[in-house]
Amino acid sequence: MKLVDLSRSIEEGIPSDPPHHIPTFEHETHEMGVERMLKTFPGSRREDLPNGLAWASETIRLNTHTGTHLDAPYHYSPTMDGGKPSATIDEIPLEWCYGDAVKFDFSDRPHGTLITSKDFQEALYRMGYQLKPMDIVLVQSGAAPLWGTKEYKDAGCGMGREATMWLLEQGIRVTGTDGWSWDRPFCYTQKYIQETGDMSAIWDGHFAGIDIGYCHMEKICNLELLPDYGFKVACFPTKIKRATAGWVRPVAFLE
């Protein structure tokens, strides 16, 4: 079995996020850790430690939506499924986060393209596959090559309400994209609203989760290494009490 890592590393100084999402690190080196270790074990001396060095560690300040993460329905709204309280990330059923997966490659579409249910249906027809409830749907948006640049946030295609609702009505509960957002980049939605005055376009892919609760991963990678289907994905999020998202390291399992 081959394992494919679908996650980005959490790292400093990457302009692919807005400023409030960029993490800050405080590094404690092996040299810096000596003083604390000696205090922890009274009577010890530096020469008692291997090579005179101690533990190293990091203190990190970051947003739950930094790096590869899984959004919970609570991120989109306080309610879902007809008025029920929205699930927070610690309440997501584990069964949602492991199963058969399907990859849709829309990376040839122009940046800002709004993907429709017809696009998904035509892709399924070409690959000879039929979605089933609880499949994990992954979208190769075309944004991935721009990771690490400030252009990444505005790159790739995205899904609006119509396409998202169609997926949810098929029984899909977890999706993922290699773009910054499940919706198409904000700059294209802003332009559309300015031209049409149609405010229903605001975050409409996310807001579909008000009607049918679902999760999606954002900022995944390596989708080009996957076949269209015939593999499984595990994407269990970090369990953070009452949080809107959790960092996740999705892995694809290929026979």
Image (cartoon, rainbow, N blue to C red):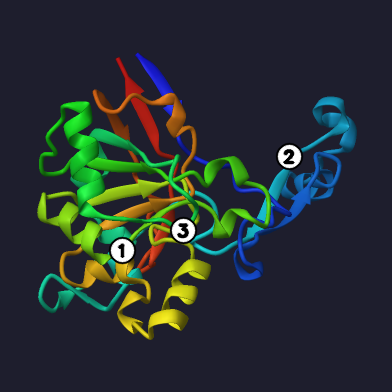
Q: Which element carries disc 1, helix, strand or loop?
A: loop
Taking the image as shown, residue 88 lies to the left or right of residue 37, namely: left
Q: Nearer the viewer, residue 250 or 175?
A: 175
Q: Nearer the viewer, residue 170 or 248?
A: 170
Q: Can you say which quadrant of the picture contains the N terminus? A: top left
Label 1: few (<14), some or many (≥20) within 10 Å? many
Can residue 93 be seen here? The reply is: no
Q: Can you say which quadrant of the picture contains the C terminus? A: top left
Pick whichever of labels 3 and 1 is earlier in the sequence.
Answer: 3
Taking the image as shown, residue 11 lies to the left or right of residue 48, namely: left
* Above or below: residue 81 compared with residue 135: below
Pick whichever of labels 1 and 2 is earlier in the sequence.
Answer: 2
Q: Position of residue 62 (x, y in %)?
A: 59, 62
Pick whichever of labels 2 and 3 is earlier in the sequence.
Answer: 2
| Front of the two marks 3 and 1 | 3
Q: Give the CA distance from mark 2 to mark 3.
A: 47 Å
Quadrant for residue 240, please give it.
bottom left
Asked if labels 3 and 2 touch by Cβ distance under 8 angstroms, the answer is no
Label 2, on which residue? 55
| Front of the two marks 2 and 3 | 3
Q: Nearer the viewer, residue 178 or 10?
A: 178
Q: Position of residue 112 (x, y in %)?
A: 46, 58
Give, as a three-letter code, the residue at label 2: Trp
Give, as a three-letter code, the residue at label 3: Gly
Q: Position of residue 185 (x, y in %)?
A: 48, 62
Label 3, on which residue? 112
Can residue 14 be seen here? The reply is: yes
Label 1, on which residue? 160
